[in-house]
Amino acid sequence: MGYTAKIDDQVVTEVPADQVTITGADFKDQAVETTVVYHANEQHAQLVIIDDDASEAIQRTLQTLTATGKYATAIDFTADGQSLAAILTSWQQRGYTVKSNSFTAGTTYQVDDKQNQFVVHLKHKTQATSRTKTVTQKITYHLPDGTTKVVPRTLTFTQGGTTDLATGETTWDANWTQTQTLAAVASPIYNGYTASAAMAGATQITVTTPTWTTNLDQQIDVYYTPTTTQIPIYYYDENGHPIADPIIVDGNGATNFDEYHKVITGYQFERREIKGADGRLTEVIFYYLKPTNGGEITPPVQPVQPVGTSQPAQPTPTSSGQGTPTAEQELPQTGNQTSETSVLGLTLLGVLGLLGLSKRKRKE
């Protein structure tokens, strides 16, 4: 087994009987020599390289090597001039590692070619990996002057996975989930304007494997509109005591508030005071003086008679039989209103009257 017998290069299984002829007389002197040469049989070997981690059966066989040689000689698997060792190194460089190898260097051909069958099992190398995802939130403030101010904020998510170095495919952690939050930020303050959101940007973002490729960025807009300012208007006497009910008005665009001046019975307007803080109006106060003549506005002083005159001069009768009305009589005493102009006129008349009285006293 494993060899083939040949005589003169002819395969024989036994020596033929007619190969030797012997006569009786020459028997003892005849020398017969037959050479039978045994030649090692030609054998065939095969080595299959299999991918144990392949997803489909058709992909399992990576490479098949064959070799032919004589029985009992060493089997030598080669491909494209590369030895088996070099071939396996090449697979390892492509992301595989040897799981098992039934072939040992120096193995010889066996009689039965079925015994010349070998298998090398490879598996995929793997490597831990990770990826990051950035979620951006942009808060855009639309400012009163027409410009915008953008405040970007970011969250970074990291997910782990395993990369197959043979295929280049990465399997990400299936049950991975991660949640992060962004706190609210205060909107800038602009006097005279109100932001659509005093605090903006509070959010909670959750990323999972299915939503990894989803755009989770956020855009938040904050707008500014003129503030509707409610301004109280008070009416006080000179001592700061209220003399009329206050009113509430819209302070937007108001400058002097003259339209809210009141005529108050028994008082005359003195001044207006506008108060504010941080560039904003807070209140308006109208101050009034109370005349000292029992609620009546004091009339101008009338000329008096010279010293020694028992009776003051009588007023000249009018056609109606009545005396000439005095300044006090001319003033309407309805108690409903007193204009600032009238008060000023009366004051001037009073001053002139005092001047006249002083002149007369000097003459006397």
Image (tube, rainbow, N blue to C red):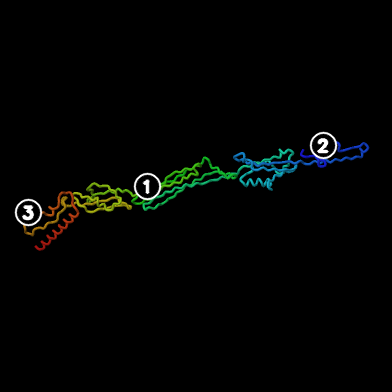
Q: In the figure, residue 351 lies in which quadrant?
A: bottom left
Query: x, y (%) of residue 129?
Result: 55, 45
Mark 1 nearby-residue class (10 Å; few <14, some 14–19, many ≥20):
some
**Mark carried by residue 319:** 3
Question: Is residue 214 visible from the viewing direction of this image?
Answer: yes
Question: Is residue 99 visible from the viewing direction of this image?
Answer: no
Between the C-alphas of marks 1 and 3, the distance is: 75 Å
Left or right, residue 292 beside residue 83 = left
Left or right, residue 237 beside residue 97 = left
Above or below residue 362? Residue 260 is above
Between the C-alphas of marks 2 and 3, the distance is: 186 Å
Q: In the figure, residue 108 lies in which quadrant?
A: top right
The secondary structure type at the circle numbered 3 is loop
Query: x, y (%) of residue 214?
Result: 48, 44
Query: x, y (%) of residue 218?
Result: 44, 46
**Mark carried by residue 12:** none
The amino acid type, in three-letter code, at marker 1 is Ser
Query: x, y (%) of residue 362?
Result: 11, 63
Please tell me which residue is depicted at 48% across the width and 47% down the height of the picture.
Answer: 134
The amino acid type, in three-letter code, at marker 3 is Ser
Q: Earlier in the sequence, mark 2 or mark 3?
A: 2
The secondary structure type at the circle numbered 2 is loop
Between the C-alphas of marks 1 and 2, the distance is: 112 Å
Q: Nearer the viewer, residue 308 or 37?
A: 37
Closer to the camera: disc 2 or disc 3? Answer: 2
Give the labeled residue for mark 1.
196
Left or right, residue 204 beside residue 19 = left
Give the labeled residue for mark 2.
14
